[in-house]
Image (tube, rainbow, N blue to C red):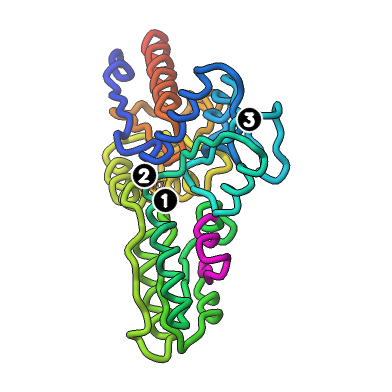
Amino acid sequence: MAGKYKQTSIEIDSGSGFCFGVSRAVKLAEEQLAKGGRLISIGDIVHNEEEVERLHQKGLISSDLDKLTGPPGTPVLFRAHGEPPASYQKVKQEGRSLIDASCPVVLKLQLRINKAWKEALAANGQIVIYGKKGHPEVTGLCGYTNNRAIVVQHPEDVAQIDRDKPTALFAQTTMSYKGYEEMEALIREHLSKPDLLKVNKTICGQVANRMPNLKVFAAKHELIIFVGGNKSSNAKVLFEVCKSENPRSFFVSSLEEIDEKWLEPAVASIGICGATSTPLWLMEQVAESMRGILDKKETTI
Ligand code: SF4
């Protein structure tokens, strides 16, 4: 039937893509690279291979702080996740200039944790962080407690918490509200007195609110193409959310992975969405590519 592909609508989810902190970090990196010369990012600036590659082409180098690669004297960039105090010292020792692209929300959280840590020292208390062990943001946060914070990720980790000490609980910014509530309940139960626990609301809505919004988006369209990096854990989780709402959801990390067969049978609408690390330009390219496939199919009916 002529027109069945032509009429297909394509929508890019306005809530997908970089959060404010990551957009800002990429912008700061691009501004520096536009001046000429190279720039060293400590770790990949974002968990998306395509975006990292685009910035590498412009002169960005990803490196460990302990084994700095790149020409001597090249400035260093801290990404949105933030860094512990030791990293700032290290950059100073190396005599490098620093572009601190730590997200302002994370910087505020570091200050809050540091203040709580000083109070805990005076009151024989403890700091607990709900987050992913080894995640760069968590490593950074722990640095503001002299690496003495207790990181809890799974229920069994609660056993490490001293039952009788005043406890200040914080969360990594990208954890889910539900997970935090469950962890809070477990810790309260574990402590000898529930009022020993002080909970700080530190989850960032930029990521936590995406899940419910994405569910609505995935259910609204007949076909979903989720664009995300293969290394991004956030992408995997959000893709599963799409898939549970809409079984006709497909994951792509690059344009080459798009399969024309996904359009059989024809659909009335296609939704394109992505993770917090997915650049908008990549979702736009996927939309363009889908439009091209639809046009081609239309002419061959
Ligand atoms: S999720 Fe929130 S706190 Fe974390 S980098 Fe993005 S904007 Fe900043």
Mark 3, secondary structure of its residue: strand
| Picture layout, residue 296 above or below residue 245 | above
Which residue lies under the disc numbered 2? 246
Q: Do the CB atoms of the residues marked 1 and 3 lie less than 8 Å apart?
A: no
- What is the three-letter code of the residue carrying label 2? Asn
- Whether residue 127 is in magenta: the answer is no
Mark 1 and mark 3 lie on one chain; the one further toward the N terminus is: 3
Residue sitting at 36 percent across and 57 percent down?
Answer: 203
**Residue 264 percent coordinates (x, y):** 42, 27
Mark 2 and mark 3 lie on one chain; the one further toward the N terminus is: 3
Q: Do the CB atoms of the residues marked 2 and 3 lie less than 8 Å apart?
A: no
- Please provide the residue range marked out in magenta: 140-153
Instruction: Compute the Cα span from label 1 to label 2.
Output: 37 Å
Res. 107 mark: 1
Instruction: Compute the Cα span from label 1 to label 3.
Output: 24 Å
Residue sitting at 60 percent across and 53 percent down?
Answer: 86
Q: Do the CB atoms of the residues marked 1 and 2 lie less than 8 Å apart?
A: no
Residue sitting at 36 percent across and 12 percent down?
Answer: 298
